[in-house]
Image: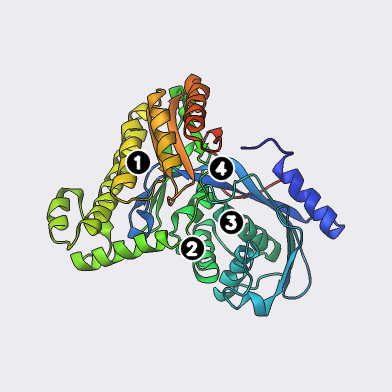
Amino acid sequence: MTGRPDVADRATAGFSCGYDATPAGRWAAPGRVNLIGEHTDYNDGFVLPFALPLRTVVAADPQPGERWTVRSEIADRPVDFGAAEADSPGRVTGWGGYVAGVVWALREAGYAVPGARLAIASDVPLGSGLSSSAALEAAVLAALADLGGLDLPAERRPRLAQRAENGYVGAPTGIMDQSAVIRCRAGHALFLDCRDESVDHVPFDLDAAGLAILVIDSRAPHRHADGEYASRRAACERAADLLGVPALRDVPVADLDAALARLPDDETRRRVRHVVTENQRVLDTVALLRAGRVAEIGPLLTASHASMRDDFAITVPEVDTAVEAALAAGALGARMTGGGFGGCVLALVEAAAAEPVAAAVRSAYAERGFAAPDTLTALPAPGATRLP
């Protein structure tokens, strides 16, 4: 998924070219994949993401007054906005809205946000379900916090970044993406309790187990704009209300059948069944990883995909094809990752089998007339940081 010059160098070059100056610093935040735990985050449940080596980098320096100028390698023109635009959710649109949203969230929380000039470069593919928006928010947040000397500990940053996306951009995302890109550690998966936002860094040593995670970009655009994500979230909230619980996280898997019997229609029952069983799959995966039994998580990954396909109805032919082809080629487990309706698939494979499995997926795509997928073999990377 890479191949261009180093992303940090591109951010520096974009800054120097755009502003005829040297940036005060560079800040990076990664994309992420969710190992398991889909659509559990906004149900107060559990998720298990890890950060990717793909990064978004922001080069920046302060500028006087309450004004922010942002350049991106994906845009011909800069975005420039002041306090009035930043304080009006939705006023800045497109990719610049995520930057303005961070400024808005910080100001709303009472921080004195410094004016700044920023240049953005990224290796995180857009629309692929690898959290390109959260990576951008986290990198911008880190840059503004450092430039302004803001007292902003890491544990507070995910909620502010999420607030930017929910309140300014208008995307109803949960807390997982921002938590992952900010708080992940190299060599670990991030076990996140989305109710109290507590985290545990669970060892995920693929190298020692002779394994790898193959990330497959299905090339099916990852869309939330069609309202499907929002409709699934609303259905879960209605179901929790009908069941008299604060969130679906509060339905134990042992009580699932009784809970389903109280729901009025099959579609609602299927949505609830996915969330409740997915939460249990996260807990089971964490237990296996803590015991060093990494290869044994494969069936849980595959069961997660089946649940997303059959109960939550969020997969598309490209991702189903990638999962089926990977499993047929010997993957230990495979599932779609992300909110659904496109995006990426991850497959747990023997390290030596990564390329043969990728080749099998490419062959299956060619047979069905799909655009060739892109692939990446990933190891768990660190979260947001300032670069040297």
Badge 2 crowding class, 10 Å Cα cut-off, few under 14, some 14 to 19, many 20 or more, is some
Sequence-earlier tag: 2 or 4: 2
On the picture, is 61 further left or further right than 261? right
Q: Nearer the viewer, mark 4 or mark 1?
A: 1
Whether residue 331 sits left or right of residue 81 in the image: it is left
SS for tag 1? Answer: helix
Circles 2 and 4: CB atoms closer than 8 Å: no
Which numbered marker is on residue 138? 3
Separation of residues labelled 4 and 3 (CA atoms): 13 Å
The reply, left or right, for residue 124 in relation to residue 352 is right
For the C terminus, which image quadrant? top right
- Tell me if label 4 and label 1 are in contact, CB under 8 Å: no
Quarter that holds the N terminus: top right
> Mark 1 = which residue?
305
Label annotation for residue 159 = 2
* First along the sequence among labels 4 and 3: 3
Looking at the rendered image, the disc whose residue lies closer to the viewer, 2 or 1, is 1
Name which residue type carries label 4. Answer: Pro
Near mark 4 (Cα within 10 A), the count class, few <14, some 14-19 or many ≥20, is many
Which of labels 3 and 1 is toward the front? 1
Distance Cα–Cα, label 2 vs label 3: 11 Å
Residue at the extreme top of the image, as rendered: 352
Mark 1 burial class by Cα count in 10 Å: few <14, some 14-19, many 20+: many
